[in-house]
Image (cartoon, grey):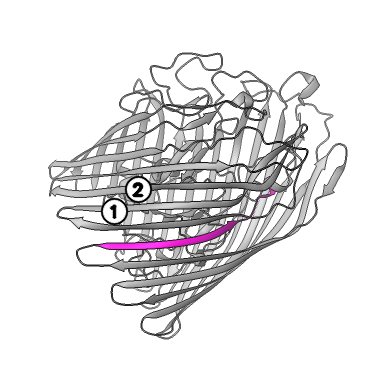
């Protein structure tokens, strides 16, 4: 059986009413194009310009720095790192203060995107052109927003109309190292807003024909040089929403989203082993989602908020004999060739959340939230589909239901001091867990449920002149996925249905202050992980156990300064250090060598925005990162893998925009100006220098 997924099901984040210093507003925001019903609780100042916020990233910043996919966009934020999974899947990854995609939930308009088989999200599939803002909660994520936020949370907030008639179109032509065509991105939006209703439709498509390697790359056995083989991808998303706003406090919205994608996976540049050199492609990577969001004032002292959703997902992974991706006739092993198969996943999820906010006094607000989500995962593998007589596997079904009950109290101790305390209880019921093997046929695993408590507290102080300080502590759990509990990993693993939840306890202190034209924000954090999953080697099989622990700590610094009306500078720096204790193996097993990978200790980003004349803006930027640890692919499943540092990099970029009309802007720019041969993970170099041309028109 295929032991990894490309798409499956979803969950729920519920909208909460944040403090005055938080991003979401208590009533619909008519001045912003952010879909406020789809926001989650993220503490930090909301930005409305080019500012790279400590927790938020707006559409202007994503456009200016040409970040069309989610992984590229959030890499601008301090404490957040983008990487590449490498291997046959070659997925784009996001780490938040060292926590990975299993430990940091992703949501769109507060509706969680969850992959029940293994939650291996490919963040390169999520487009940003129709996104108003990206919210990132780091460490402390409100219990009201739902289960699973062990290390933080990421939420994409779509747009909504702000005028009686508004329209926007945009396009970017991408050029490779030699200024030849390499792809494009297009976006269109049409919306209308009236006193008691609004409607909007948007569409975005990102197509990449190829990308080029840096000029310093030397050809290898698997890669002869530019363009990089198997880098063709295509993604599009359409969103339609209608809303009803009968008064100043209430809002009801119905949204539908359709997303389709397809991609190939580049090969490791040197490894020729069949275990590593796999010819995989994903011709389909599709999502359908319909969701209803609402907020209703119950008198002057209470507010009711609801979310109801239904999602369907379809994903196909195909494995071929050859690089031309035309033959599927081997089953692997004694046949002498790589295993070939078609592996479809068909999944659905439905659920909802209800939250009641009640003002106990003028300074005290109590919130109670209840979440429900049912995930159904269906898979089957068609081995060697090129052989007409081959026998297909039967469908294997997994059904799980997740619940969460949360309570949060926000007390304004004084005009400048707020105390927030929260707790929740999460539990998961497993109703069905099927697997298939040639020897046993279709069989079921033991149905083991799981539960866990969460607790958190935060103290916020706000002074004059933009000064603020805070301290927080949060302890959260994360339930293991189907893959972690049940997968045999191509007969290389012993399943463990009895895995317990992982837990992370996060501490943070920070603050910000205005110094003349400059605003400075700082944060220091420490996270302790317990019951972390560790792979134990017992004979020829691996088995996961809850015996690991880890310590993550670091600091972040952000600065923004409006030097003159025409000159703005900004940047941020992150330091993240991680250590992991793998614990002691049970009798009869041993723990292979293990190190944490993919996250550099030092990372920074800086930019300058200069307007020499009113219609012209020039924005150079620089992204730097220290070396990060990676592991050689050929020994990734061996008992003694080889770990080594990838090397540091300094990635320069520039963008120049000129407004030919007040409503029409032309742009030109370049990325990886220094044409560095950047490697984030073993055997998979990043794109070299590239160029782009863009146009944007708004009405």
Q: Which quadrant of the figure has residue 539?
A: top right
Label 1 or label 2, whichever comes before in sequence order: 1
The circle drawn on residue 556 is 2
Q: At 45% from the left edge and 21% from the top edge, which residue is drawn? A: 227
Percent of width and height locating residue 639: 67, 29
Vertically, is 63 above or below 162? above
Q: Residue 413's x, y, as percent?
A: 35, 77
SS at mark 1 in the image: strand
- The answer to whether one can see residue 162 in this image is no
Q: Position of residue 562 (x, y in %)?
A: 17, 50
Q: Nearer the viewer, residue 2 or 177?
A: 2
468 within the magenta span: yes
Of residues 457 and 170, which is closer to you in this image?
457
Q: Residue at x 75, y 47 (%)?
A: 496
Bin the neighbour count of mark 2 within 10 Å (Cα to Cα): few under 14, some 14-19, many 20 and up. many
Question: Residue 159, percent across and down?
Answer: 39, 57
The disc label shown at residue 117, or none:
none
- State the residue at coordinates (71%, 23%): 338
If the image is split into quadrants, where does the C terminus sit?
Answer: bottom left
Q: Main secondary structure of the magenta part?
A: strand
Whether residue 651 sits left or right of residue 390 in the image: it is left
Q: Considering the image in quadrants, where does the N terminus appear?
A: top right
Quadrant in the rendering for residue 614: top left
Q: Is residue 485 above or below residue 350?
A: above
Residue for badge 1:
521
Residue drawn at (41%, 52%), measured in percent from left and top? 525
Contact (CB < 8 A) between labels 1 and 2?
yes
Q: Is residue 693 above or below residue 482?
A: above
Identify the magenta region: 467-482
Of the pair 355 and 519, the residue shown nearer to us? 519
């Amino acid at each position: 059986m295929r032991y990894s997924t490309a798409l499956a099901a979803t969950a729920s984040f519920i909208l909460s009413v944040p403090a005055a210093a938080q991003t979401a507003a208590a009533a619909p925001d008519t001045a912003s194009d952010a879909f406020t019903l789809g926001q989650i609780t993220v503490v930090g100042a909301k930005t409305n310009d080019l500012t790279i916020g400590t927790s938020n990233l707006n559409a202007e910043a994503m456009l200016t720095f040409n970040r069309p996919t989610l992984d590229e966009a959030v890499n601008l934020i301090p404490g957040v790192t983008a990487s590449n999974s490498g291997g046959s899947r070659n997925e784009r990854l996001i780490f938040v203060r060292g926590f990975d995609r299993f430990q940091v939930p992703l949501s769109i308009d507060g509706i969680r995107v969850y992959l029940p088989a293994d939650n291996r999200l490919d963040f390169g599939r999520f487009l940003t052109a129709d996104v108003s803002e990206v919210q990132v909660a780091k460490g402390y994520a409100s219990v009201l927003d739902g289960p699973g936020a062990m290390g933080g949370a990421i939420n994409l907030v779509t747009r909504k109309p702000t005028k009686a008639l508004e329209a926007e179109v945009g396009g970017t032509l991408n050029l490779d190292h030699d200024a030849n065509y390499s792809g494009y991105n297009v976006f269109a939006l049409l919306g209308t807003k009236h006193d008691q209703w609004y409607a909007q439709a948007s569409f975005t498509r990102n197509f990449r024909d190829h990308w080029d390697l840096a000029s310093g790359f030397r050809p290898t056995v698997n890669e002869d040089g530019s363009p990089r083989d198997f880098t063709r991808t295509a993604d599009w998303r359409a969103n339609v929403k209608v809303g009803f706003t009968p008064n100043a406090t209430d809002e009801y919205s119905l949204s539908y989203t359709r997303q389709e994608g397809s991609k190939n996976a580049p090969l490791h540049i040197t490894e020729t082993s069949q275990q590593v050199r796999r010819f995989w492609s994903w011709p389909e990577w599709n999502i359908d989602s319909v969701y209803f969001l609402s907020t209703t004032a119950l008198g002057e002292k209470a507010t009711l908020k609801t979310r109801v959703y239904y999602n369907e997902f379809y994903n196909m992974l195909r494995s071929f004999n050859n690089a031309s991706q035309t033959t599927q006739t081997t089953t692997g092993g004694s046949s002498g060739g790589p295993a070939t198969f078609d592996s479809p996943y068909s999944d659905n999820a439905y659920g909802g959340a209800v939250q009641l906010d009640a003002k106990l006094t003028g300074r005290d607000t109590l919130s109670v939230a209840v979440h429900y989500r049912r995930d159904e995962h269906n898979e089957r593998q068609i081995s060697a589909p090129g052989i007409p007589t081959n026998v297909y596997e039967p469908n294997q079904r997994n059904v799980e239901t997740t619940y969460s009950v949360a309570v949060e109290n926000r007390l304004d101790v004084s005009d400048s001091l707020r105390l927030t305390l929260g707790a929740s209880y999460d539990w998961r019921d497993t109703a069905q867990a099927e697997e298939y093997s040639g020897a046993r046929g279709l069989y079921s695993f033991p149905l083991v449920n799981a539960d866990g408590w969460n607790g958190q507290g935060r103290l916020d102080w706000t002074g004059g002149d933009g000064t603020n300080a805070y301290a927080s502590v949060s302890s959260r759990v994360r339930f293991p996925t189907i893959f972690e509990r049940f997968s045999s990993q191509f007969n290389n693993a012993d399943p463990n249905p009895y895995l317990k939840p992982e837990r992370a306890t996060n501490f943070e202190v920070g603050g910000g202050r205005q110094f003349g034209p400059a605003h400075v924000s700082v944060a220091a954090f420490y996270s302790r992980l317990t019951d972390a999953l560790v792979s134990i080697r017992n004979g020829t099989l691996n088995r996961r156990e809850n015996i690991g622990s880890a310590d993550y700590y670091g600091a972040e610094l952000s600065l923004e300064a409006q030097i003159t009306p025409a000159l703005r500078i900004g940047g941020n720096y992150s330091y993240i250090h991680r250590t992991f204790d793998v614990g002691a193996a049970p009798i009869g097993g041993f723990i292979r060598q293990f190190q944490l990978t993919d996250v550099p200790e030092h990372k920074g980003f800086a930019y300058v925005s200069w307007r020499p004349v009113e219609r012209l803006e020039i924005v150079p930027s620089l992204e730097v990162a220290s070396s990060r640890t990676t592991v050689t692919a050929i020994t990734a499943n061996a008992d003694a893998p080889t770990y080594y540092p990838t090397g540091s990099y300094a990635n320069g970029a520039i963008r120049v925009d000129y407004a030919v009309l007040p409503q029409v802007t032309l742009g030109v720019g370049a990325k990886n100006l220094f044409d560095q041969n950047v490697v984030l993970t073993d055997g998979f170099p990043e794109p070299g220098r590239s160029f782009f041309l863009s146009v944007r028109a708004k009405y």
